Amino acid sequence: MDNNLINEDNIIDTIIKMMEKTEQFIDKTGIEKKVIVLDNIKTIMGQESYNRYKYLISSTIDFIIEVSKGRKINLNNFKKKFCCISVK
C-alpha cells in the first residue's frame, strides 16, 4: 500500500484492510490487535493528522468490530467530542 495515497476518501478502506491483516495474529487479544492497527494508521498518516482524528479512527474500529459481530449499534452512545473540519 502506498502511504501517500491515504486520505479522507479511503481511510475506512485502509482501516478495514489493516484490521483484516491483523486478524492473522491469533496469539493477540482484541485490544492488542486494535493497538497494532492504530499504530499502523499513525505511521501512515503522520503524528499531526493522526492526533486530529484519533478518536474518530478508534471509534470507527470499535464500530466495525461491533457490526462484524452482528451486534445492534446505538449511535446515540457515540461521543461527539471532535470536529473533522479544519479551516486554514
Image (spheres, helix red, strand yellow):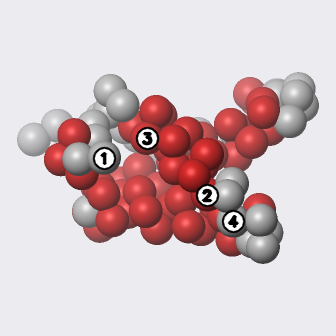
Left or right of 41, for residue 75: right
- Amino acid type of the residue that numbered disc 3 sits on in the rendered structure: Thr
Q: Which mark is residue 22?
A: 2
Residue at 56% over, 67% down: 36
**Can residue 59 be seen in the rendering of this structure?**
no
Q: Is residue 9 left or right of residue 21?
A: left
Whole-number angstrom distance, CA of label 3 to CA of label 1? 9 Å
Q: Nearer the viewer, mark 3 or mark 1?
A: 1
Instruction: Tell me if 28 is positioned left or right of 55 in this view.
Output: right
Q: Secondary structure at mark 3?
A: helix
Q: How many other residues sit within 10 Å of disc 2, few (<14), some (14-19) or many (≥20)? A: some
Number of other residues with Cα within 10 Å of mark 1, as a class: few under 14, some 14 to 19, many 20 or more: few
- Residue under the image location 46 percent in, 33 percent down: 13
* 41 on left or right of 62: left
| Residue 68 position in % (x across, y down) | 78, 33
Which residue, given by chain and number where applicable, does mark 4 sit on? 25
Mark 1 or mark 4: whose residue is earlier in sequence = 1
* Pointer 4 with pointer 2, Cβ within 8 A: yes
| Amino acid at dot 2 | Thr
Q: CA distance from mark 4 to mark 2?
A: 6 Å
The answer to whether the residue labelled 3 contacts the one labelled 1, judged by CB atoms less than 8 Å apart, is: yes
The answer to whether residue 23 is above or below residue 72 is below
Q: Which residue is mark 3?
A: 14
Q: Amino acid at mark 1?
A: Met
Q: Relative to 24, is 17 above or below?
A: above
Q: Which one is closest to the eye, mark 2 or mark 3?
A: 2
